[in-house]
Image: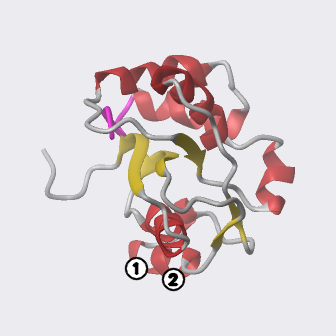
Amino acid sequence: MVPWWYDYPLMMVIRALKYRGALYLAEALAQGWKRCPIAVKPDCVMPVPLSRHRWRERGYNQARELAKPLAHILACPVVEGLERTRHTCPQASLPRQARQTNVAGAFRVIRPVAGLRVALVDDVLTTGATVTAAALALREAGVGGLQIWVLAQARSPNDP
């Protein structure tokens, strides 16, 4: 579920949340998801985790901050069910082709998810490499259903 394109001025608001600690923006940004149709209600909301290194740098996980108001909207709990198995380079600093390699195998499931319908949350979808790697770990652990919820999607060169 993606309510917006990652364009100006929204990109500046998302960057303030992600890089400048403007956590108060998470609630307002999450309201965009109210516009998205929900075919099947998930059992839980699960944020894409940061590496320990990145967590120490920022002091918070922007995906978790977004997952909290989304869980309220969907009336289900936030579950910390994934962890990063290793520190990866920031995806934004890499060319498109290197992003999948960078996050391949970087996630593992740390909670039972077999049969659960999970709403996986992240802030921005560019190439999809991060959510694809996280989704693969969840699918291998037997997740019952998976929805991807991101605030904004970067436009490809062919998008209007």
Is 104 placed left or right of 155 in the picture?
right
Residue drawn at the location 69% of the way across and 49% of the way down: 80
Q: CA distance from mark 2 to mark 1?
A: 8 Å
Q: Is residue 50 magenta?
A: no
Whether the residues at callouts 2 and 1 have beta carbons within 8 Å, the answer is: yes
x and y percentages locating residue 133 in the rendered image: 50, 71
Residue at the extreme front of the image, as rendered: 115
Q: Amino acid at mark 1?
A: Gln
- In which quarter of the view is residue 152 placed? top left
Task: Estimate how packed mark 1 is, as few (under 14), some (14 to 19) or many (20 or more) residues with alpha carbons within 10 Å.
Answer: few
Q: Amino acid at mark 2?
A: Thr
Q: Which residues are magenta?
A: 1-8
Is 80 placed left or right of 130 in the picture?
right
Q: Image quadrant for the N terminus? A: top left
Is 30 placed left or right of 17 in the picture?
left
**Numbered circle sitting on residue 101:** 2
- Residue at disc 2, secondary structure: helix
- In which quarter of the view is residue 90 placed? bottom right
x and y percentages locating residue 79 in the rendered image: 66, 44
Q: Is residue 5 magenta?
A: yes
Instruction: Identify the residue under disc 1.
Output: 97
Vertical order, 40 against 159 (above or below): above
Residue drawn at the location 72% of the way across and 63% of the way down: 110
Q: Image quadrant for the C terminus? A: top left
Residue drawn at the location 87% of the way across and 52% of the way down: 56
x and y percentages locating residue 97 in the rendered image: 40, 79
x and y percentages locating residue 132 in the rendered image: 43, 67
